Image (tube, grey):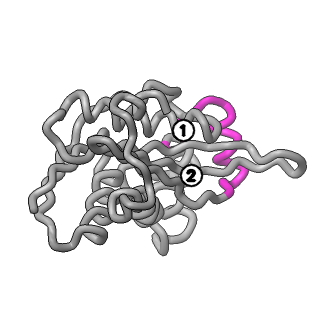
Amino acid sequence: MKRIVAVGSTNPVKLEAVKAGFRSIFPGDALEFVSLEAASGVSAQPMGDAETRQGAQNRALAARNAQPDADFWVGVEGGAEETPGSPRALLTFAWVVILARGRRGQARTAAFELPEAVADLVRGGLELGDADDLVFKTSNSKRRNGAVGLLTGDVITRAGLYTPAVQLALIPFIRPELYPAETPGTEDKQ
């Protein structure tokens, strides 16, 4: 069976994670991936769980609008969030939202604490990738290994962090009997 997967991003890391996740869940299917420019509709650096999830949702919806004949529409959005209490820490993570006709899946990646030098720059208004580039003296890390790759020496890369969330977001599609179908149009409102 051939399935078209429209990804609401041209970032090669996000596309790599989506490809790896779908190929592992649907190993016998012919999968065609389409990478599309898709606005997140949120801040350049989403702050907080809700804004980050909304960005992923918006990217999936934009992919659906741009490629309505696809079988799946995927949005991936990275974000950051302050931990409550003291000491204060800035965590980073991503949300994945996958839409299909009458069904949705969503999952969040693991989160990890950013070093204070990076966190201060993000709190000051920089996108995480730009902050990483300044602190680690690199360029365009958000389109390669990301903060997690820079911090772990590529033991875990950004694509490696995102892939399990793609797999988890696909659960409603591999176990549809456990997840009720959505009423048409409701996926836009969640």
- Name which quarter of the figure residue 56 lies in: top left
Q: Tell which residue pokes out farthest to the right in this image.
A: 86
Q: Is residue 58 above or below residue 155?
A: above
Residue 119 lies within the magenta run: yes
Q: How many numbered marks are there?
A: 2
Q: Is residue 131 above or below residue 21?
A: above
Residue 122 lies within the magenta run: yes
- Look at 10% across and 62% down and name the residue there: 1
Sequence-earlier tag: 2 or 1: 1
Q: Hey, what amino acid is under mark 1?
A: Thr
Tell me the number on the disc at residue 93: 2
Residue 73 versus residue 89: which sits nearer the camera? Answer: 73
Q: Do the residues bearing badges 2 and 1 touch, measured as CB atoms within 8 Å?
A: yes
Residue 29 versus residue 174: which sits nearer the camera? Answer: 174
- Residue 68 screen position, x and y as percent: 18, 33
**Left or right of 25 in this view: 42:** right
Tell me the number on the disc at residue 52: 1
- Look at 20% across and 47% down and name the residue there: 71
